[in-house]
Image (spheres, rainbow, N blue to C red):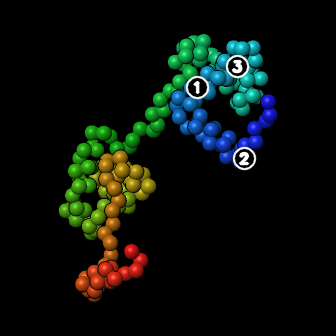
Amino acid sequence: MRKFEIPDVETFIAAIQDEITGRPEGRYFHRLHVILHVLQGASSYEAAQFYGHSPRTVQYWIHRLLSHGLRGLWDKKHPGRPSKLPRSKEKKLRNEIRRSPRKLGYDQNLWDGPLLSHHLKEHYGITLSIRQCQRLFHRLGFTLQRPRRQAHEADPLKQEEFKKNSTDG
């Protein structure tokens, strides 16, 4: 049988590795293949070298299989760091963000990361970076929207006429 000529092999390798490592079921099936290789007679060192892992990792997976069965090869949940803002205060904050910042005594019309960071520090005693505040907006279901600027001397009729006669579409 002749060998396949595959163009751009590195791209395919990277894409397949991303598929395997990027999904929980991909990692699970990959672990099954590695352990199957060991069960068919390869040492953990040979399987590790063949599949690109450390021997200790392969031994760890075998231990998980023996102690917990096949379900031991699934990834565990990674909860991450707990939020500084308790869930009990999220509803109150969401209601405050729905209101204009001016109604809460601030000098601007729109909420943004720096203002939310300041508000959390002053009213909740919580210090969050601007980027974390932007993430908090999204977690609470808000999106950052800015009004389009318009020159005060612009003539809306001339603008509309320009749009109609524009050749750009």
Which residue is disc 2 drawn over?
Answer: 7
Q: As drawn, is 136 to the left or to the right of 55?
A: left
Check disc 1 and report its element: helix, strand or loop. Answer: helix
Question: Residue 48 at what x, y percent from top left?
Answer: 73, 26
Q: Quadrant of the C terminus?
A: bottom left
Which amino acid type is marked by label 1?
A: Phe
Label 3 to label 1: alpha-carbon separation = 12 Å
Location of the N terminus by quadrant is top right
Q: Is residue 57 left or right of residue 146?
A: right
Q: Earlier in the sequence, mark 3 or mark 2?
A: 2
Q: Give me the residue at 44% from left, 55% from top.
A: 131
User: Considering only order in the chain, which callout, 1 or 3, is on the residue closer to the N terminus?
Assistant: 1
Q: Amino acid at mark 3?
A: His
Q: Nearer the viewer, residue 91 or 75?
A: 75
Residue drawn where x is 61% and y is 21% of the image:
32
Q: CA distance from mark 1 to mark 2?
A: 27 Å
Which amino acid, by three-letter code, is at mark 2? Pro
Residue under pointer 3: 37
Please provide percent x and percent y for residue 11: 67, 46
Q: Secondary structure at mark 2?
A: loop
- First in sequence, mark 1 or 2: give its number: 2
134 versus 63 height, above or below: below
Label 3: state its secondary structure. helix
Q: Residues within 10 Å of mark 1 (few under 14, many from 20)?
A: some
Q: Position of residue 125 (x, y in %)?
A: 33, 49
Q: Is residue 51 visible?
A: yes
The residue tagged 1 is 29
